[in-house]
Image (cartoon, grey):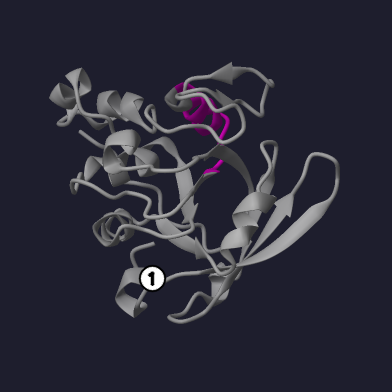
Amino acid sequence: MLEPFSPWEGTDLKGLKLLIKAKGKCTTDHISMAGPRLKFRGHLDNISNNLLIGATNFFNEKINSVKNQLDGSYNEVPKVQRAYKAAGIGSIVVGDENYGEGSSREHAAMEPRFLGVRAILVKSFARIHETNLKKQGMLALTFADKSDYDKIKEDDSIDIIGLTNFVPGSQLTLILNHSDGSKDEIKVNHTYNENQIGVV
């Protein structure tokens, strides 16, 4: 039996690790690749080993190879995310334009939620995937200024500020804490209505 997802803590989210900054097209097939693992779609833990294994990492131009900020090593996306989950650390996925285009795969939204990803921040969403993320209680956010995508660095620790006053039409603030001690502050948008906010 699946255990219920943990409810939101009622606070801003701080210290989120960057899981991946996906470069270019990132369809639902990149997020949850078709193929042999689809036989596990009734077993969320197993199919979550599919998470973002087709996405290209902006920083090394490689597929399914991201930096684990806990030890500095590079490994497969699901393995790094499982390490964060085991350590009780939330993470964030950053994407490009039309993130989640393609077939409507519910598990492409369930997998990040199950493994402990707290937010998806992109230049723009494919509408159906954004809806699926909302239904799974994920934070689906878009850059207010798309050029802020370039400010995301590989070793960033990210704070999401404004969740305690999360209302329709509001903006949230992200603090990008860089490894050199510098910071950037950016604004992000959302499309949640009051009912959807109650699910997050």
Q: How many marks?
A: 1
Residue 51 at x, y = what percent?
36, 32
Can you give x and y, in whole percent of width and height, for residue 157 in the image? 68, 44
Considering depth in this image, is 86 or 59 the residue closer to the camera? 59
Q: Mark 1 belongs to which amino acid?
A: Ile
Q: Is residue 79 left or right of residue 155?
A: left
Q: Is residue 47 rendered to the left or right of residue 67?
A: left
On the rendered image, what quadrant is the C terminus found in? bottom left
Residue denoted by label 1: 197
Residue 50 against residue 198 in the figure, above or below: above
What residue is drawn where x is 75% and y is 58%?
A: 184
Q: Does 199 sit left or right of 162 as displayed?
A: left
In the image, is residue 85 part of the stretch drawn in magenta? Answer: yes
For image coordinates 70% across by 53% down, the residue present is 176
Asked whether residue 99 is drawn in magenta, I would say: no
State whether residue 13 appears in this view.
no
* Front residue of 115 and 39: 39
Magenta segment range?
Answer: 79-91
The answer to whether residue 197 is left or right of residue 178 is left
Determine crowd level at label 1: few under 14, some 14-19, many 20+ residues with C-alpha closer than 10 A.
some
Identity of the residue drawn at 47% across and 27% down: 77
Q: Is residue 32 above or below residue 24?
A: above
- Residue 178 drawn at (x, y percent): 77, 45
Locate the N terminus by quadrant.
Answer: top left
Q: Which residue lies furthest to the right in this view?
A: 181
Residue 109 visible in this rendered orientation of the protein? yes
- Residue 110 to residue 191: above or below: above
Q: Position of residue 54 (x, y in %)?
A: 37, 29
The local secondary structure at tag 1 comes to helix
> Is residue 41 or residue 25 the one in the foreground?
25
Q: Main secondary structure of the magenta part?
A: helix
Taking 93 as reference, is 35 above or below it? Answer: above
